[in-house]
Image: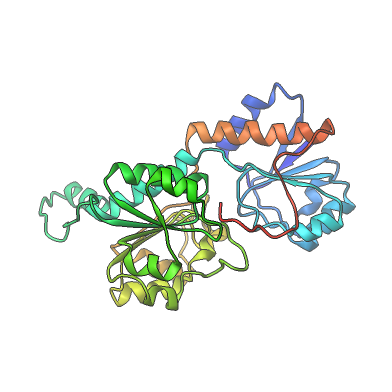
Amino acid sequence: MKITFFGTQPYDRESFDRIGGAYGFEFRYHRNHLNANNAILAKGYDAVCIFVNDTADAETIGQLSELGVKLIALRCAGFNNVDLAAAARCHIPVVRVPAYSPHAVAEHAVALMLSLNRKIHRAYWRTRDGNFSLHGLLGFDMYGKTAGIIGTGKIARELIHILKGFGMDVLAHDIYPDAEYARTAGITYVPLEELYARADIISLHCPLTDQTRYMIGDVAIAHMKPGVMLINTGRGQLIHTEALIDGLKEKKVGAAGLDVYEEEAGYFYEDTSDRIMDDDVLARLLSFNNVIVTSHQGFFTREALDNIARTTLQNIADFDQHRKLVNEVRAEPENSMV
């Protein structure tokens, strides 16, 4: 198998080169993201390996098919950037990495919560400048507060386990609630409106679908508890950013921790510090001292990178050996929040 990678960084090469030796595949890496304008780079390759900011729309997939590409391998869990219907029409299977490290993302969500609550980011910059005042750094006890978790898949369950350890009450919402899990974990499934009204912290852990796109907008925010903290380590388009900014300005939203952004492709994973930011919405977000934006790094641990490489390469090996593709995603709509 000859595999060409798009959107690669040095850490991608390191993990795939180190682990890939056992598979005997041929690799080629590209820094630029896959799209219809550069799909020709996949000519002569059996599979393309892509990440969250690559674009595998109908036009791109059509070109890949004409070039002889037989497999699209995602080295991530989400697949909203792939037109699955177009892939099916072209008879190109799509595989993903469903669970590279739920611990990594859950722990990053907690890091955002704690940093925002105890103003760690502000305290860090203050003390570097010799300012040891506590004014403006007041937080709250996590113990006894209520967390609202939207989606109860693998990552969410790790997060719930951690938050229960803080002594928090947990409300959850999933279109397919798991009663047995709720009983053993000590959580309560509730309708979204109730979760919005009662939760002190809301964390998003559902996939991006037509049903969940911009689920956090003006209406949802209006139903939330004043001063709510919003955490998003899922997909950027779960939140309507301008509605979030309005909520922050009106102090309806007390803080926001975002590891994703709906227009992140032009910025995330790249060093853009030498140019003026031309995304006014992102610039406005970054101006709030009660907002932390990280560069889609929730997955970024040594363990997760190794798991991504191993699972991706095993997916490709299974395809090459005509075995069942256990991590294949198909055009049928996803029904459960994972």
The quarter of the picture where residue 23 lies is top right
106 vs 1, left or right, is left
> Residue 257, percent across and down?
37, 57
4 vs 181, left or right, is right
Q: Is residue 232 above or below residue 71?
A: below
Q: Residue furthest top?
A: 22
Q: Is residue 10 above or below residue 21?
A: below
Q: Residue at x 33, y 62 (%)?
A: 199
Quick one: 178 or 243, which is closer to the camera?
A: 178
The quarter of the picture where residue 333 lies is bottom right
Q: Is residue 215 above or below residue 92?
A: below
Q: Where, quadrant-wise, is the N terminus in this rendering?
A: top right
Q: Residue at x 70, y 53 (%)?
A: 34
73 vs 337, left or right, is right
> Residue 289, percent across and down?
28, 63
Q: Residue at x 44, y 67 (%)?
A: 192
Residue 144 showing in the rendered view: yes
